[in-house]
Amino acid sequence: MPRRKPRSKESARSHRDPRPLGDVFGRTEPGPGTDDIFIVRTVPGARAAKSYRCPGCDQVIPPGTPHVVAWAAHGGEDDRRHWHNGCWNGRNTRTITRRWS
């Protein structure tokens, strides 16, 4: 079997300029059951390193699972909540099992 050519160093992705994963700035959407506006960011599975509890279903979001992070636009990032994608998309059709505060 013939040997492969070595990769050139120019074609390798630089570690100083990583490709952004997910929504860097977020988007705005109406919140769950309120008229408040929420900032929403998607978190791809490659960036999800910790376990979180979803306020929509009160189940754990395991590491490596793509999900969304949402917080009130008038609040701060300290009020972030991690949601399953399906729970966030269905936030207005079901009740929330956990309180926001």
Image: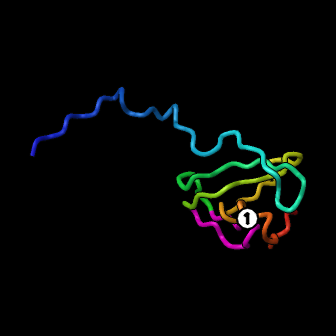
Numbered marks: total: 1
| Closer-to-camera residue (70/31) | 31
Identify the residue at horizontal 14%, vertical 40% (top origin): 3
Q: Is 20 displayed left or right of 97 in the figure?
A: left
The residue pinned by badge 1 equals 90
Residue 96 spot, x, y in % from top left: 81, 70
- Relative height, residue 5 to residue 97 (above, below): above
Q: Which residues are magenta?
A: 51-63
Identify the residue at horizontal 53%, vertical 53% (top origin): 46
Q: Is 45 displayed left or right of 29 in the figure?
A: left
Q: Amino acid at mark 1?
A: Gly
| Closer-to-camera residue (79/87) | 87
Residue 58 lies in magenta, yes or no? Answer: yes
Q: Magenta region's main secondary structure?
A: loop
Q: Residues within 10 Å of mark 1 (few under 14, many from 20)?
A: few
Residue 74 spot, x, y in % from top left: 89, 46
The kind of secondary structure element at disc 1 is: loop
Q: Quadrant of residue 83?
A: bottom right
